[in-house]
């Protein structure tokens, strides 16, 4: 098993290029099976999750060519040979559920094992199934699997009880080939939803309203192949923004869409960081003002992203004054607190609130990456901790960050990967 060894580092300096979005490329790859023609996906990040999705699509009959050296994935699905996603792949990644909508739309049947991924709380797929049922599918749930069948999908009105990103994406992909009009209300508004809609519209879909709380889809008979560049990863962007601040550094972050990280920009400014948006990227400086406490509350987009909660918490342990973090999206996303406390953070949990005294001098320790974003937070804390921080189970981190170690090294971080 691999580990990361992180030593206390000075302020990070230099520039970093943000990769394509993990959370955008996975649904786009799944959507490629809606057509028999070739789909050419550019700026695809080289990640374990992308590799798992390539294998998953290959298992159902897609011809997948991954040119990782150039961040390109090509998918062509002339014939679907299996309508079931194998458990050995699904258990590795929750995003596997995203093949269900396209399979149902293309073949009239989709069966999938209940998905895996990070253990950050209950993430039921009932909203996905509710949408499929509204479109006319019959749902059968068995021990460890769920199946949807429909001779024909018919457009319908769907109201989501919660603006789930995955459910929004899955229902969108099912509805593009349905007969008639589908209106989905209370949908997720994340940039990744907009990117998926743009990709589908390039394929010939008729989707309006992506990025708002209501999406309208006019079903079409068929889709065609296309070429599409994935948006930059806003969570990787946020992670490096916080890295610049926590080390009191000066980092230019390139390939950024500032509108996608507005909440992170706002909260970093409240802490005293200076952020400058220029033609060549976004510069984040933590070396000008003393950094002070602020409070955050995670919310669906455009609120503060739950995927940035743990990284920001690492920062708040080192600033002046007490802070409160409230997690409203996932009920089990505080597992990293025990690991940060091993490093001296002294964070206390009260219900869904985490209370940080701040002003902590962190100490290196042996810690565990409990999930993808928690692992990133431990790396950030390790950059400020005295001594060496040894992080195990780093496969979580490698699921979602491309060239993670190399990017940090180029900024001056003392970090290395070892095989235990």
Image: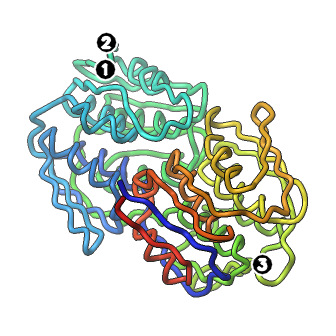
Would residue 269 appear left or right of 335 to someone viewing this image?
A: right
Quadrant in the picture for the C terminus: bottom left
Labelled disc at residue 145? 1
The residue where tag 2 is placed is 142
Q: Which residue is nearer to you in this view: 383 or 294?
A: 383
Badge 1 crowding class, 10 Å Cα cut-off, few under 14, some 14 to 19, many 20 or more, is some
Residue drawn at 29 percent across, 62 percent down: 41
On the image, the x and y values in percent for residue 376 come to 55, 59
Query: At which x and y percent is residue 98?
Result: 36, 38
Residue 262 rendering spot, x and y as whole percentages: 69, 62
Q: Residues within 10 Å of mark 2 (few under 14, many from 20)?
A: few
Identified at 71% across, 49% down, the residue is 341
Q: Is residue 83 above or below residue 341?
A: above
Left or right, 280 with respect to 106, comes to right
Disc 2 to disc 1: CB gap under 8 Å: yes
- Report whether residue 23 is seen: no
How many callouts does the rendering have?
Answer: 3
Real-space CA distance between mark 3 and mark 1, rounded to the nearest whole angstrom: 49 Å
* CB under 8 Å between discs 3 and 1: no
Nearer to the camera, 117 or 224: 117
Q: Which residue is mark 3?
A: 274
Q: Element at badge 3? A: strand
Horizontal arrangement in the rendering, residue 127 relative to residue 263 (left or right): left
- Judge by depth and name the residue closer to the eye, 209 or 6: 6
**SS state under label 1:** strand
Whichever of labels 3 and 1 marks the residue nearer the N terminus, that label is 1
């Amino acid at each position: 098993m691999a580990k990361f060894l992180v030593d206390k580092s000075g302020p990070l300096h230099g520039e970093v290029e943000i990769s394509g979005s993990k959370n955008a490329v996975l649904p786009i790859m799944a959507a490629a099976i809606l057509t028999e023609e070739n789909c050419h996906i550019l700026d695809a990040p080289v990640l374990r999750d992308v590799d798992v999705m390539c294998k998953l699509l290959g298992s159902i009959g897609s011809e997948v060519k991954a040119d990782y050296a150039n961040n390109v994935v090509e998918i062509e699905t002339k014939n679907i040979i299996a309508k079931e996603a194998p458990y050995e792949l699904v258990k590795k990644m929750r995003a596997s559920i995203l093949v269900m909508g396209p399979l149902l739309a293309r073949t009239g049947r989709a069966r999938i094992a209940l998905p895996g991924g990070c253990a950050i709380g209950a993430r039921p797929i009932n909203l996905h199934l509710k949408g499929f049922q509204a479109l006319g599918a019959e749902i059968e749930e068995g021990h460890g699997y769920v199946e949807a069948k429909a001779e024909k999908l018919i457009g319908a009105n769907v109201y989501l009880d919660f603006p789930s990103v995955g459910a929004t994406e899955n229902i969108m992909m099912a509805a593009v080939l349905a007969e008639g009009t589908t209106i989905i209300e209370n949908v997720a508004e994340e940039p990744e939803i907009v990117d998926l809609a743009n990709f589908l519209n390039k394929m010939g879909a008729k989707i309006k309203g992506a990025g708002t709380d209501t999406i309208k889809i006019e079903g079409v008979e068929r889709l065609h192949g296309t070429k599409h560049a994935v948006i930059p990863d806003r969570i990787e962007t946020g992670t490096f923004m916080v890295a610049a601040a926590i080390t009191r550094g000066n980092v230019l972050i390139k390939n950024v869409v500032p509108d996608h990280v507005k909440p992170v920009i706002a909260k970093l400014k409240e802490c005293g960081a200076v952020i400058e948006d220029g033609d060549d990227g976004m510069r984040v400086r933590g070396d000008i003002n003393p950094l002070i406490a602020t409070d955050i509350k995670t919310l669906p987009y455009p609120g503060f992203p739950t995927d940035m909660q743990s990284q920001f918490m690492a920062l708040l342990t080192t600033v002046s004054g007490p802070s409160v973090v409230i997690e409203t999206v996932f009920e089990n996303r505080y597992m990293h607190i025990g690991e940060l406390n091993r490093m001296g953070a002294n964070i206390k949990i009260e219900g869904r609130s985490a209370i940080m005294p701040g002003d902590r001098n962190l100490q290196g320790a042996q810690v565990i990456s409990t999930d993808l974003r928690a692992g990133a937070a431990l790396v950030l804390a390790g950059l400020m901790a005295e001594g060496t921080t040894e992080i195990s189970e780093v496969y979580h981190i490698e699921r979602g960050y491309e060239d993670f170690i190399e990017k940090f090294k180029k900024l001056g971080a003392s970090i290395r990967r070892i095989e235990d």
